[in-house]
Image: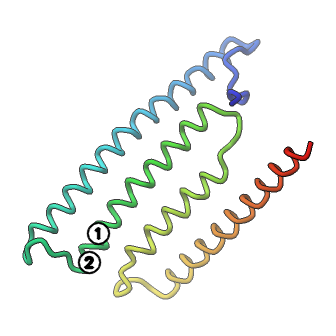
Amino acid sequence: MQTHEELPTEHKDKLIAFLHKMIKIAVKVLAILMVFVIFWGVGDVIYVLYKHLMAPPFMLLNLEDIFKTFAAFLAVLIAIEIYQNIVLYLRTDIIPIKLVIATALMAIARKVIIIDFNTITPMYIFATATVVLALGITYYLVGKHHKERMLDEREK
């Protein structure tokens, strides 16, 4: 994989080179913080599951408890996706568009899974459906474009 050329650490202007190094350090700090968030989220999943399993009726989950547990799981998975975005940003010069779209799809899917239909408006449902559709189409088109590029490169 190639390194980022958007933030070259060797630049004729020493200030710009220094600032680029600082930005790369900031991104590394974000990666470290995201790992902490992931472990904190895993702890939260364990806590949420334990709390719901210990509440009466003992060792049984009702539908609302299952949705809260799913929401906690998906929040951790979204954090992992964001971490992967950060790592790819550090390692390559390719913007991971497909991964960013997949992360957004997972985030909106989490919203759909935990929707409380008793408290939202029809417009909210319509807007959410529009976002899901737009992201789904975008993900499909980006994936299709990626496959076509890979086939073109193999033919060369």
Instruction: Name the outermost residue toward the right.
Output: 156
In-image side of 7 versus 109 (left or right)? right
Q: Which quarter of the rendering shows the C terminus? A: top right
Q: Which mark is residue 64?
A: 2
Q: Which residue is mark 1?
A: 68
Name the element at disc 1. helix
Neighbour tally class for label 2: few under 14, some 14-19, many 20 plus, Cα within 10 Å: few
Q: CA distance from mark 2 to mark 1?
A: 6 Å
SS for dot 2: helix
As displayed, is residue 94 above or below residue 53? Answer: above
Q: What residue is rendered at 49% in x and 29% in y?
A: 28
Query: Is residue 31 placed above or below 82 in the rendered structure?
Result: above
Residue 75, picture quadrant: bottom left
Q: Is residue 35 left or right of residue 52?
A: right
Disc 2, disc 1: CB below 8 Å?
yes
Q: How many marks?
A: 2
Q: Which mark is residue 39?
A: none
For the point 59% across and 20% down, the residue is 21
Q: Residue furthest front?
A: 155
Colour treatment of the image: rainbow
Q: Amino acid at mark 2?
A: Glu
Residue 37 falls left or right of residue 80? left
Q: Position of residue 127 (x, y in %)?
A: 56, 78
Residue 148 lies in what quarter of the image? bottom right
